[in-house]
Amino acid sequence: MFHPVSSKVNFPQVEEKILSLWKENNAFERSVEARQGGRRFVLYEGPPTVNGSPGIHHVLARVFKDVIPRYKALKGCYTQRMAGWDTHGLPIELEVEKELGLSSKAQIEEHGVAQFNARCRESVFGYLKEWEAMTERIAFWVDLKHPYITMDNKYIETVWWAIKQMWDKGLIYQGYKVTPHCPRCGTSLSSHEVALGYQDADDPSVYIKFRVSDRAVREHLRKFGARPDLPTYLLAWTTTPWTLPGNTALAVAADAEYAVVEVGDEYLILASALLGSVGLESYKVVAKVNGSDLVHLQYEPLFNPHRYGVERRHMSPGLPLQEPVRDLTYSIIATDFVSMEEGTGIVHMAPAYGEVDYNAGVENGLDFVHPVDLQGIITGTYPFSGKFVKEADPLILDDLKSRGLLLRSETIRHTYPFCWRCETPLLYYAKQTWYIKTTAVKERLIAGNEEINWYPEHIKYGRFGDWLENNVDWAFSRERYWGTPLPIWRCESCDKYECIGGVQELESKPEFSGLLKQLLDLHRPFVDELTFDCPECGAKMRRVPEVIDCWFDSGAMPIAQWHYPFENERLLEDGRFPADYICEAVDQTRGWFYSLHAISTLLFNRPCFKNVICLGHILDARGEKMSKAKGNVVEPWAVINKYGADALRWYCLTASPPGNVRRFSEGVVAEVTRRFLLTLWNVYSFFVTYANIDRFTPSPEEAPSSQSELDRWIISELNQLIVDVDTALDSYNPTEAGRKIESFVDYLSNWYVRRSRRRFWKSESDADKLSAYTTLYQCLVTLSKLLAPFTPFLAEELYQNLVCSAFPEAPDSVHLTDFPVADKGKIDQRLAADTRLAMKVSSLGRAARSQAGIKVRQPLAKVLVKVGSSKEREGLRRLMPQVLDELNVKGLEFGDEAEFDKPGYSVNSEGGYTAAVPTEISPELQAEGLAREIVHRLQMMRRSAGFDIADYITTYYQGEAYVRQVMEDFADYIKQETLSRELIEGTPEKGAFTESYKLGNYDILLGVKHLD
Ligand SMILES: [Zn+2]
Ligand SMILES: [Zn+2]
């Protein structure tokens, strides 16, 4: 006997029961250990930062991470998988700053770096319990007991080792480069971080006048009849007024035409092509010149830095400081990046604030003026000093306006990079930063990508491939506190640098001092205390102040999770590297996917993952990004508590291909529950209920081939399903696999079980009935195994009840079984096609009936059918009983066009197939129809009265003569269908359950009573 299964089910409750079962018998650990010795299958877990609650997008990723290793385990692979937590970096620091009420680096240092970092260490795991609970609840099977943690000393030591390898290859350098800088966080961002934070923003769009100081120009203009006493200005455009104090040149296009125009009582110079677009109301062109004619012209800076206490350097090696000059002028240069699409054709250059400007400054030997500090505050004694740059913008414009140097000012909406963590606008600064020379291995990065399978495929040469093609060196140092310290020591005296690749190496340095032996923390400020003697000059070597980008931490996890090479030194040969599979959302192409690939290529000259599923973003039901501010975040817990984890998993895996952007709401989970999980549950409940009534016991031996076409068909479909699911999962396509399962379950429920109901229902046990049980049993057990990677709870529920209860020697969890193997000999394509045709014709026939308003319970004489070929006729003839039964007709005939045109038929066609039913009903058929209606009512009454399916009853009826006649004529049929021992005409006995109906034109009173 199986445990009784009600058709009403509370999935979350079932799942909680299964969770305790797994915990009790260590199902996860055993599912891994049982496969030791099998081929390794490696998942790298991309470590989440756990200082916030897991969201629905985390669940999505974790479900996709789970399904493939589960499948591989069933296929016999050894699938150790380690959880990991990302614990360093700005997000953590920001949270702690907020908590402690600190708002700048100066305040952090005042507070004390040791205390600050101690707080970071505590806060890292603020939500760890919730993450573990969620991971467990959704059945993401990963080793939570032995996770890798990026802040552990061992982890840090491997990261140091990795950096040292790169240092030894000459791949790490300190560059004076313009980097995207977050003034709030006080640190540079790498280009992949910048790519994460573009937003639309309103900025000033201003036209600025730079006064020409050259006499020669005025003399030249005189030739065109211009008045030498009027001032002449070069017109330039900018959206960042705060960079204007840093202006040290103007750039033109040498071969473009520029116009000198008279406006009021002054002259303006700008590109002829842009004359119409700068908003001049009236002007007169007095001269036209080439850009090359303007080169080397001198103009007066808007703000002479010397007057505001700001230093001026020259852009030659060492950036030498320049003497103050009272009448400072700058010159015009020619470059090839001047746009004739927007602006004025004259570009304002501030080498301190932009990579292009900086490079042009080096090339042309310009001046370098940088009056902004690392917090984004204007230095010096300008009227707007002490202000944050964006707040200084309007003050700068006021100042220029008061001096008549502002032609026009408006605002522009454009895309601008913001800090991906704190949403402060990024500023582009020239400053010293440590770089990894990834460009040195660019070709290897690209070649390595060839070996990676991307799902979806377009990422390979699209998003990821482009990113590699446009590779720039990795600015990987951070001027922060809570991170892996950059293991580079610098001599105070002779400027020698050394990189340290491990703790032992550090301790063995000459005159090493510090407390490392007792010190168990490799973080700041403790590592900052560790010094040793310079091998060159004997002076003290101290660590540089920077920590590293936390993307380097997570990208080093393939080796750092194993403390390689200090432990597990055979890691690269024993199958644990590279990973077979990783999976994250698409924004990781420039994040973790890239850092993994870059580090692995730099260290080992090869990629570290073979297959990657790249998930699209999750939006809300209306297609908007979920955010706390908008209040449209769907909490995963709420969904899981209501529908269960399997429902959410099934939605994630099958609703849309992984790479697509998806719209999520509670409704979509309700829908998959109804459409799939409940359909399957009903089949399961149906089977168990009837199998228990008939005391069906499954046999371990294989069932003999059934005589029933239905059985042979569903077994054929089942074996085809095994092949399809196996193939799809093997090619990292769980969505396709899941959808195949879903359509099989639809066949099973809506054709196989429906068409087989009578076989289970009939009271005698014979070979046909046994064959139906055996077939349905096989389908459900196989489904439980196929579903194990997708809906591990439901799969386990089925397996426990159907298999474990009957076969005590079977593996005690579905997750310890082997993936089913298809018996391809049982796949009958012809039968599959014929059955599809029978379903098709049935569906056309049902539509023809409903068109004519004839209920399915009313038997009809025949259905007239047209199909495509003689082969199809033959197939349909073979399956005729199924169609007759489904359509409740007495015969099936093939007809041609002419017959369908005759009156008296309701006709329905689709795609070359037609089914028609006669609309005339004979008195005999009418009587039979009434008998069927009565049976249907009695069956409903049995349910309403709460009788068991196998209970015998007495039936009472009252009605006019016709009704009595039908009851008598169809007495055997009615008794059999309703398990009635007797049909008694007259008032129902006391205690009977009664109802009155009007069936067609006839009134009838029915009563049912339980037989004691
Ligand atoms: Zn920031
Ligand atoms: Zn030295």
Image (cartoon, helix red, strand yellow):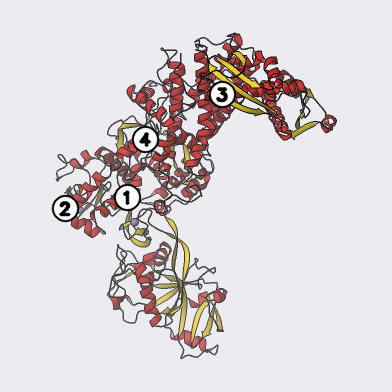
Q: How far apart are the two marked residues, 2 and 3, measured between alpha carbons?
A: 104 Å
Q: How far apart are the two marked residues, 1 and 3, measured between alpha carbons?
A: 69 Å
Is residue 977 at all visible to an observer of this figure?
yes
Tell me the mark number nearer the camera, choosing from 2 and 1: 1
Q: Position of residue 639 (x, y in %)?
A: 43, 39
Say which of 387 and 332 sits in front: 387
Whether residues under marks 1 and 3 lie with C-beta atoms below 8 angstroms apart, the answer is no
SS for dot 4: helix
Three-letter code, disc 4: Thr
Q: Earlier in the sequence, mark 4 or mark 3?
A: 4
Is residue 451 at all visible to an observer of this figure?
no
Say which of 126 and 31 sits in front: 126
SS for dot 2: loop
Task: Look at 20% across and 42% down and name the residue there.
Answer: 521
Is 711 on the left-hand or right-hand side of 917? left
Which residue is disc 1 drawn over? 91
Three-letter code, disc 1: Pro
Is 953 on the left-hand or right-hand side of 93? right
